[in-house]
Amino acid sequence: MKTTIGIIGAGAIGQTVSNTILASDLADRLLLASRTLVQAQALTDDLADMRTTTGSATVPSACRPEDTVAAAALVIAIRERFTNDNATDIRMAGAEANARAIRDLGHRLRGYPGTVLIVTNPVDLMTRLFAEASGCTRVYGIGSNLDTARYRLTLSTLMGVPADQVHGHVIGEHGDSAVICASTTTVNGQTVAIPVRDIRETLARRPGLISSGVGRTRSGPAGAVLSTLRLVLGQADGTTELCTEWNGHWLGVPVTFAAGQGKPALPALNPTEADRFTASGHKLDTAYQNLATIH
């Protein structure tokens, strides 16, 4: 079946997502848009070189953001210019700057019938903002699935087992109030004692360590996008953690996909985890309302 995927944003994440999709042959066609058509065309030309050297079947082409509505799924990875001086809540720093662009894009793509994956931070706020501005009904935010992957990797290293033997979730905000679901985490099928505080500190440091070394996290988010695209396009079934609406809040929860249709459901939470999840939702609601009053 022919599949077209659109990517809006030709920065570090947009470039890496584009490379990943082209190398995977996930789509037959890749529509690329950015702040300017010049940027989109430059990325298209670079990908055309990659396509020729690798023999990929995916054909990239530059377009305006409005033209991406021809795609079955859109990945939005725009990022406005801003200075991030935050010592905590680092992903919140660009909320005001990115909100303007996300809201404008939502209006321009209003009524788009496909699936939209938001990568722009703070992703929980931007996912809600785009969904409300666009009226699109299948909008998900990429973040909690990356948090979960990092959690599984960290725990697998600590326990000395392969990452695929670790099963657990990180939910709530893609940020400082993320909730580690330690009570339902298993290693080799068995529940184990989880050093939650130490792991939370490790997960909080990891993005900064990557960014300090290579400028910005790229590959992890791109992998999270690729695996999610397979699910939303019906090319695979499974569960992943995504920002979506849950009981009136927008935050990360596990979403199970079958034939491209997603159904969110929370894992069992102990009282501490439930309290943290509730607090995470309230924090994001307050931040969103503050954003609405500013704009």
Image (cartoon, rainbow, N blue to C red):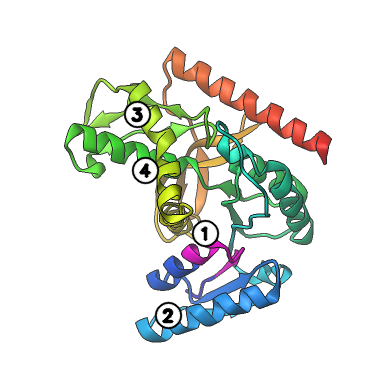
If you read the primary sequence from the N terminus, does the residue marked by circle 3 or circle 1 appear first? Answer: 1
Query: Residue 50, labelled with which disc?
Result: 2
If you read the primary sequence from the N terminus, does the residue marked by circle 2 or circle 1 appear first? Answer: 1
Query: Residue 149, labelled with which disc?
Result: 4
- Gap between marks 2 and 3, in whole Å? 38 Å
Nearest to viewer (mark 4 / mark 1): 1
Magenta highlight on residue 75: no
Residue 226 horizontal/vertical position (percent): 44, 59
For the residue marked with disc 4, what is the amino acid?
Ala
For the residue marked with disc 3, what is the amino acid?
Ile
Query: Residue 237, labelled with which disc?
Result: none
> Residue visible at 78% across and 55% down?
104
- Contact flag, marks 2 and 1 (Cβ < 8 Å): no
- Look at the numbered disc 1 and give the secondary structure of its residue: helix
Query: Residue 13, labelled with which disc?
Result: 1
Residue 76 horizontal/vertical position (percent): 61, 58
- Contact flag, marks 3 and 1 (Cβ < 8 Å): no
- Look at the numbered disc 2 and give the secondary structure of its residue: helix
If you read the primary sequence from the N terminus, does the residue marked by circle 4 or circle 1 appear first? Answer: 1
In the displayed structure image, the side of residue 198 where residue 177 appears, left or right? right
Q: Which residues are magenta?
A: 5-17
For the residue marked with disc 2, what is the amino acid?
Met
Q: Nearer the viewer, residue 201 or 213?
A: 213
Task: Check disc 3 and report the residue beneath it.
Answer: 199
- Gap between marks 4 and 2, in whole Å? 28 Å
Nearest to viewer (mark 4 / mark 3): 3
Q: Is residue 52 above or below residue 267?
A: below
